[in-house]
Image (cartoon, rainbow, N blue to C red):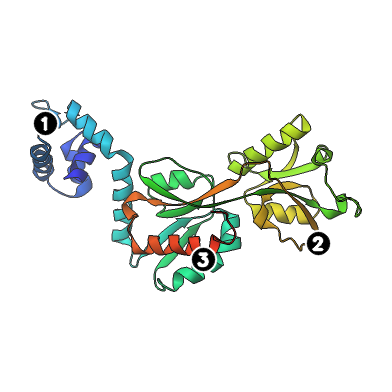
């Protein structure tokens, strides 16, 4: 009944909703009438001789309250109905996938050996994909603040400045960050959280914006460019091993730590596979993130 009402309200007619649901006009109308009886108020008004409908104030309130959450649920149900086997769709920033998810998947497979996992490795559109029903869960450095998405804090990490060691004389024991003002800076794509934090930090030290020479979508790619001597960057401290002899690193304790969240669509809050993936993330990341 809710699905029928939602489509009637969205399309503006019983006939359009009935075609989408593959039911009769009268069945669609009966669904809405029964919902009105349960709700105790008239939700839809139709002018005599016209098939177009309008919503009453109570109908508008109900339609608004269903909003994105019902859209997400219906989208996921439609996907599940057409999948031959269970698929959990997960969004993860590229660097997190490369550094941590082989171990996370190994842990996850202990309790869920058969479910298919489909990964999407891009950070900037995870919230949008979660809202439109394209993802079931995600690991993100953003807090979305949406009622239809449940997020739990996994922990947080520090950022560090990395640079080719060939830029600094061996006897130098302390790096003066201001000396990098004229050097090429390698950063994340516009819109990414780490790009904004890095530019704000460097701008305060330099008295102006850093000289951005190259942008890339992930920390792994950026670190490889620094390793090749093409510039310096600010990345998560876990991206570079302390024994790497080609890359120098300075942990930036003055920058606020970056929080990391596990998120899932609210209607999958108690799904066994979502719970297992969340537990695996917590276990593997416990030693890398400060809870």
Mark closest to the chain's N terminus, 3 or 1 = 1
**Residue at horizontal 62%, vertical 43%?**
194
Earlier residue among tags 3 and 2: 3
Neighbours of disc 3 within 10 Å: few (<14), some (14-19), many (20+): many
Q: Earlier in the sequence, mark 1 or mark 2?
A: 1
Q: Secondary structure at mark 2?
A: loop
Q: Is residue 53 visible?
A: no
The residue at which mark 3 appears reads as 104
Q: CA distance from mark 3 to mark 1?
A: 51 Å
Q: Which residue is mark 2?
A: 245
Q: In the displayed structure, does residue 74 sit left or right of residue 121?
A: left
- Marker count (numbered): 3
Q: Would you identify the image quadrant in which residue 53 lies? A: top left
Which corner quadrant of the image does residue 11 belong to? top left
Disc 3 element: helix
- Percent of width and height locating residue 211: 76, 37
């Amino acid at each position: 009944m809710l699905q029928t009402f939602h489509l009637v309200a969205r399309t503006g007619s019983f006939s359009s909703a009935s075609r989408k649901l593959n039911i009769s006009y009268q069945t669609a109308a009966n669904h809405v009438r029964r919902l009105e009886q349960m709700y105790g108020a008239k939700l839809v008004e139709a002018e005599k001789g016209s098939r177009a409908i309008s919503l009453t104030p109570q109908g508008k309130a109900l339609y608004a309250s269903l909003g994105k959450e019902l859209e997400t649920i219906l989208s996921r149900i439609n996907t599940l109905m057409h999948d031959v086997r269970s698929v959990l769709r997960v969004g993860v920033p590229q660097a997190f996938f490369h550094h941590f998810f082989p171990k996370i998947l190994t842990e996850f497979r202990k309790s869920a050996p058969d479910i298919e996992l489909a990964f999407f490795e891009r950070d900037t559109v995870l919230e949008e994909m979660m809202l439109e029903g394209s993802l079931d869960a995600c690991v993100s450095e953003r807090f979305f603040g949406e009622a239809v998405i449940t997020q739990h804090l996994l922990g947080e990490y520090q950022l560090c400045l990395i640079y080719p060691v060939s830029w600094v004389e061996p006897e130098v024991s302390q790096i003066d960050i201001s000396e990098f003002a004229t050097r090429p800076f390698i950063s994340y794509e516009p819109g990414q959280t780490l790009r904004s934090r890095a530019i704000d930090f460097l701008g305060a030290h330099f008295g102006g914006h850093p000289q951005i020479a190259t942008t890339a979508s992930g920390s792994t790619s950026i670190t490889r460019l620094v390793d090749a001597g093409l510039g310096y960057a600010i990345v998560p401290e876990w991206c570079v091993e302390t024994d790497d002899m080609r890359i120098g690193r300075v942990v930036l304790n003055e920058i606020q730590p970056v929080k990391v969240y596990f998120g899932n669509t609210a209607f999958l809050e108690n799904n066994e596979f979502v719970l297992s993936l969340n537990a695996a993330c917590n276990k593997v990341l416990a030693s890398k993130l400060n809870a």
